[in-house]
Amino acid sequence: MPRSTHRVPSRNRRKKVLKLAKGFYGRRKSNLKLAKEGVDKARVFATIHRRDRKAAFRSLWTVRINAAARELGTTYSRLISGLKKAAISIDRKILADLALSDANAFAKIVEAAKAT
């Protein structure tokens, strides 16, 4: 009886790894052992950087809100404190978007925060 090697599933596993390693440099894209290492490392970095991206966007929003608030005569920390005291719950992403796209609405929010 011939020896069974599970040829199709093993080939598919190898092809899957090598497909993910497409674009890697040197033997990392063609040698299975090196490609596995590269793909595993790339996945680790992708997870880390997905988390880092959230922090980077939050700091970008903070900078934009602060710049727009200073044009209206207040600072970022005073604005956020005033919003909390006025019970206005609006997140930083939306505030930054308003500061860029709709200056009048942002000015009204700042005035409401200053009033408290």
Image (spheres, rainbow, N blue to C red):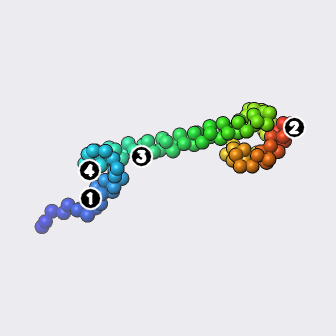
> How far apart are the two marked residues, 2 and 1, measured between alpha carbons?
68 Å
Front residue of 80/102: it is 102
Q: Judge left or right: residue 102 versus residue 25.
A: right
- Local packing at callout 4 (Cα closer than 10 Å; few below 14, some 14-19, many 20+) is some
The amino acid marked with disc number 3 is: Arg
Above or below residue 87? Residue 75 is above
Report which residue position mark 2 lands on.
115
Q: Quadrant of residue 78?
A: top right
Report the residue marked by disc 1. Answer: 10
- Which residue appears at 41% of the width and 46% of the height? 43
Of labels 4 and 3, earlier in sequence is: 4
Q: For marks 2 and 3, give the CA distance.
A: 49 Å
Whether tag 2 and tag 1 are in contact, CB under 8 A, the answer is: no
Q: Tell me which numbered mark, 2 or 1, is placed earlier along the sequence.
A: 1
Q: Label 1 to label 4, Cα distance in Å?
A: 16 Å
CA–CA distance in space, label 3 to label 1: 21 Å
**Rendering coords of residue 69 (x, y %):** 75, 37
Q: At label 4, which amino acid type do we have? A: Ser
The residues bearing labels 4 and 3 have C-alpha atoms spaced at a distance of 18 Å
Name which residue type carries label 2: Ala
Q: Nearer the viewer, mark 3 or mark 1?
A: 3
Decide which of tag 4 and tag 2 comes sooner along the chain.
Answer: 4
Which quarter of the figure is the N terminus placed in? bottom left
Give the residue at mark 4: 30
Residue found at the far right of this picture? 115
Mark 2 vs mark 1: in front: 2
Question: Would you say the residues marked 1 and 4 are in contact, meaning their CB atoms lie under 8 Å apart?
Answer: no
> What distance separates the C-alpha of mark 4 from that of mark 2?
65 Å
Q: Of helix, strand and loop, which one carries label 2?
A: helix
Q: Which residue is mark 3?
A: 43
Question: Mark 1 or mark 4, which has the lower sequence index?
Answer: 1
Mark 2 or 3: the one toward you: 2
